[in-house]
Image (spheres, rainbow, N blue to C red):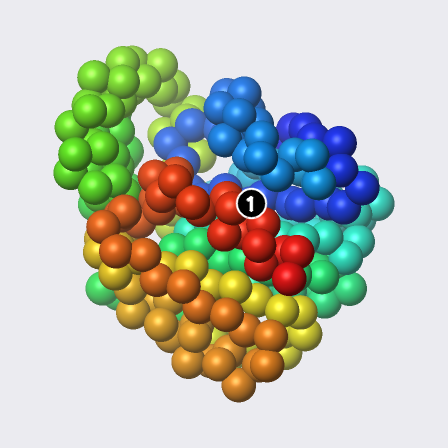
Amino acid sequence: MEYFRFGEGEKTLVILPGLSIQSVMSAADAVASAYASIAGQYTIYVFDRRSDLPQRYTVRDMARDTAEAFRALGLRKVCLFGASQGGMIAQVIAVEHPELVSRMVLGSSSAHVRPEQYAVLEKWIRLAKAGDREGLYLDFGREIYPPEVFESSRDTLTEAAKTVTERDLERFVILAEGTKDFNIADELDRIQCPVLAIGVFEDKVLDSDATMEIAEKLDVHPDFRLYMYIGFGHAAFDTAPDYRERILRFLES
């Protein structure tokens, strides 16, 4: 499992990114730049998924391997931010390995992937299996970004599609299929740490109802917080200008 690290703070923040067509490792510089405002207070780790994937690899499997990576690096009581599928992994870690997490932020995630939430992922899986790299990248961008951001990014996405390998497509399919039937909703009451759930009303991938279900399950927790964006799309963690500052305020509260 590959990871990269930046920042020089005494506290530790771990970022678990969402499902991506290509490895997050290629975006290390962009991620470090985006989180520069936090890097003074935190040493930040960003984890990819396991390198060698079995044909069936569920979210709970991803969480098991990620927790093992935490232990291998001596990471305990970290602040944990999980985006989309990364948020699903984060929830499992917080439930099954509470000693590893001190505070958690969930961005555009789900505790229970219902068939209607899996529909967009199914479409992406079909495109990947068909080898339609450009179609996959463009539809990915169309679904996660607001229309104006997608249109301004269209050429960049088209160029990125040219670099997608057969192995990238195979990994994407396995990781996307791993979210099917994911359900930890009835276990969320076992989470011990403070949680901030950030959702988007116009989430076209997992739907805003996914964030609201998390809120319903955790609302009895005195340290639970909810924030909903309007107009930023599923990937608000990339498009909302105050997103990192909002995470930092919660982690420092």
Q: Position of residue 216 (x, y in %)?
A: 42, 80
Task: Indicate the quadrant where residue 242 lies.
Answer: top left
Task: Reply above or below: 148 against 187.
Answer: above
All told, the count of numbered labels is: 1
Task: Reply above or below: 214 against 244.
Answer: below
Task: Indicate the quadrant where residue 170 lies.
Answer: top left
Observer-nearest of 24 and 116: 24
Q: Where is residue 58 in the image (x, y as percent from the top left)?
A: 50, 55
Badge 1 marks a residue whose secondary structure is strand
Q: What is the residue that sits farthest to the right in this orientation?
A: 74
Q: Which residue is drawn at 64% across and 62% down?
A: 253
Q: Which residue is drawn at 16% across and 28% down?
A: 151
Observer-nearest of 43 and 242: 242
> Mark 1 belongs to which amino acid?
Leu
| In this picture, residue 172 sits left or right of residue 35 | left
Q: Residue at x 42, y 59 (%)?
A: 198
| In this picture, residue 71 sits left or right of residue 231 | right
Q: What is the residue that sits farthest to the bottom in this orientation?
A: 220
* Residue that carries the numbered disc 1 in the rendered image: 16
Asked if one can make out residue 93 in the rendered structure from this viewpoint, the answer is no
- How many other residues sit within 10 Å of disc 1, few (<14), some (14-19) or many (≥20)? many
- Rendered-image quadrant of the N terminus: top right
Q: Position of residue 93 (x, y in %)?
A: 64, 60
Asked if one can make out residue 228 in the rendered structure from this viewpoint, the answer is yes
Task: Reply above or below: 201 against 177.
Answer: below
Q: Where is residue 30 in the image (x, y as percent from the top left)?
A: 49, 24
Q: Which residue is drawn at 71% across and 40% down?
A: 41
